[in-house]
Structures are given as C-alpha cells and as structure tokens.
Amino acid sequence: MVLPFLCRLISSSACPPISSPVRTSPAFTRAFTSTPSPQATLMQVLRGCRKPQRARHAVSPALRNRPEMKGVCLKVGITKPKKPNSAERKTARVRLSNGTNVTCYIPGEGHNVQQHSVVLVRGGRAQDCPGVKYHLVRGAMDLGGVGNRITSRSKYGTKKPKAPS
C-alpha cells in the first residue's frame, strides 16, 4: 500500500486515486426516521436484547381450559365494587369439582342460590369486583333463570314468554 503523501512525490500514474470514504450518492444516504430498525445490531444481540416472550396468564385459571365446571356453593354474599361504582354485587363462594374454591358473580336480578346449591361456573370477570374471575350460568342446575326477562334472555336462562292468544 502506498501512502498518500508519497503519491504526490511519485508520478500520479503509479498511485491509485484517493477516494473519499463517505459516498454522497442518493442511494447511500439514509432518510431520518423515528421508527427503530427491524433487526437488532450485532452489539445489541451480544448485550442480550433477545428475550423470549412471556407466557400469557389465564383469566380464569381454576377452570383449566374447560368452558364450564360444576361446583357446590359454600357461601352466598354481596361484594362492594371498586372505587367509582357503588352497588351491592351478588357473589357466591363455590367449591369446583376439581377441589378449588373460587368466588363467582351471580348475574341478573334476584337469584335462588343458597348453601349446598349445585351450580355451573363459567369464566369471565366481574370488572368492578376485585378477585371475582368467574360467573355462574343462569338457568343451569340449581340456579334458576331471571324471571320476567325480555331482552338478552339466553344470557340469563329465561324462556321465551308465551304470546297472548
């Protein structure tokens, strides 16, 4: 390799032309962008940027990937909702058939659940009640449907009312 200051002393034909290290053609200029590059650089990988995704946690873990489970009521009571809301939410403490005890929300107006009632438990939180991750299914087993219900009857276990004749 010939040093650049020696190229001036020797004839110009013996030395290769000195090229600038930075290219200014439009193909090599990068436009400014605020989005990160899709791939990690080598140094980021060496520092340990690649971490596996965390596993998702189940919303209703006691059901163990089942749609519903049978259970026996241990205690029926009311729960006060979280801060902006004010009411008395009807809840039941239920021992499921797999042996776990869970707190369930009783949907609809009025219910006939009492201790030792056999009920069907499905997943689904009561959003404003802390610790309540399950719902009872209305109209199944010992829990009756909501009486005089006109709309959303399938959610509350109510039959279609007889048409007046």
Image (tube, helix red, strand yellow):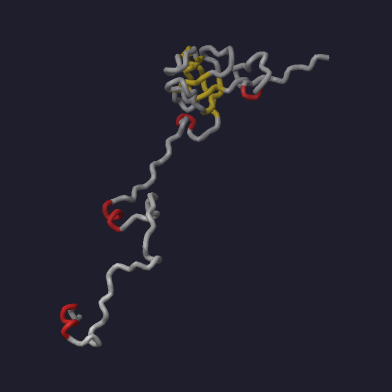
Q: Give the residue at x 59% y 14%.
A: 109
Task: Looking at the picture, tell me which residue is in the foreground, 161 or 17.
Answer: 17
Whether 29 is drawn above or below 17: the answer is above
Task: Looking at the picture, tell me which residue is in the foreground, 130 or 93.
Answer: 130
Whether 25 is drawn above or below 3: the answer is above
Q: Which corner quadrant of the image does residue 28 belong to?
A: bottom left
> In the image, is 27 to the left or to the right of 5?
right
Task: Looking at the picture, tell me which residue is in the foreground, 4 or 42.
Answer: 4
Q: Give the residue at x 66% y 17%.
A: 149
Q: Which corner quadrant of the image does residue 136 belong to?
A: top right
Task: Looking at the picture, tell me which residue is in the foreground, 61 or 119.
Answer: 61
Q: How many marks?
A: 0
Q: Give the residue at x 16% y 78%.
A: 5
Q: Locate residue 117, reporting x and y percent.
A: 55, 15
> In the image, is 165 to the left or to the right of 34?
right
Which image quarter is the C terminus in?
A: top right
Which image quarter is the N terminus in?
A: bottom left
Q: Give the residue at x 27% y 56%.
A: 43
> In the image, is 48 to the left or to the right of 70?
left
Q: Locate residue 76, reporting x and y percent.
A: 49, 13
Q: Locate residue 36, reporting x and y percent.
A: 37, 51
Q: Locate residue 23, reporting x and y percent.
A: 33, 68
> In the image, is 148 to the left or to the right of 98?
right
